[in-house]
Image (cartoon, grey):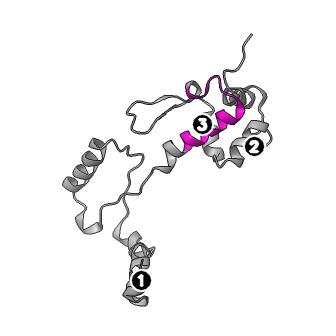
Amino acid sequence: IHASASPFEGFAERINWLAASIQEDPFGKLMLSNGIPETMIKAWSVDPQIFAAQGEKNKKSIFDQLEDQNASDCVDRLVDLYMLNTLNQAFVFIKPHAVTDKVKALAKTSLQEKGIRIVAEGSLSGKTIDEMKLIDKHYYSIASKATLLKPSELN
């Protein structure tokens, strides 16, 4: 006999064993209604290693973080884990004029030394930046305030 150790683990087992739908499962609906995206729910249903507390350097099993909790406590903890593992994110880029191997290495090392996890890296060509007007879009809010508002209207 096997019994799930938490409402979330029970949900994951229903998804696996019964091919249940996240949108139709009662606990799935509860997670979705609390703002946890379906992609995250799917990823977590196979018990990945996640950060369980702010500032932790080692990841832990998500299932272990939810054991022996009732449904409301479990979903509250899932929301906390979602915020901890996804919402504290930033987009960091090196400005085009500064892109060198030394600057890239410095940026990466500096972020990692501060405990910041880099989840993806990439590059854009000057042509792409120009065609997509990325510089214009990036500086639009600053420029619009500088040209349209009086100093007394700025926050």
For the point 39% across and 82% down, which residue is it?
143
Name the residue located 29 percent from the left edge and 44 percent from the top edge: 114
| Residue 136 is covered by the magenta coloring | no
Read off the residue under disc 3: 77
Residue 141 in the image, given as x and y percentages of width and height: 44, 77
| Three-letter code, disc 2 | Lys
Q: CA distance from mark 3 to mark 2?
A: 16 Å
- Residue 43 lies left or right of residue 28; in this view the side is left
Q: Earlier in the sequence, mark 3 or mark 2?
A: 2
Mark 1 and mark 3 lie on one chain; the one further toward the N terminus is 3
Residue closer to the observer: 79 or 136: 79
Magenta residues span 65-82
Give residue 18's quadrant in the image.
Answer: top right
Residue that carries the numbered disc 1 in the rendered image: 145
Work out whether 82 lies above or below 131.
Answer: above
Please name which of the two marks, 3 or 2, marks the residue nearer to the observer. Answer: 3
Q: Is residue 75 magenta?
A: yes
Q: Reading the chain from its start, which is encountered first: label 2 or label 1?
A: 2
Question: Residue 35: where, in percent of width, then height?
Answer: 65, 49
Gap between marks 2 and 1 measured at Cα: 42 Å
Say if 13 sits above or below 97 in the image: above
Callout 3 secondary element = helix
The answer to whether 108 appears left or right of 48 in the picture is: left
* Residue 80 visible within the image: yes
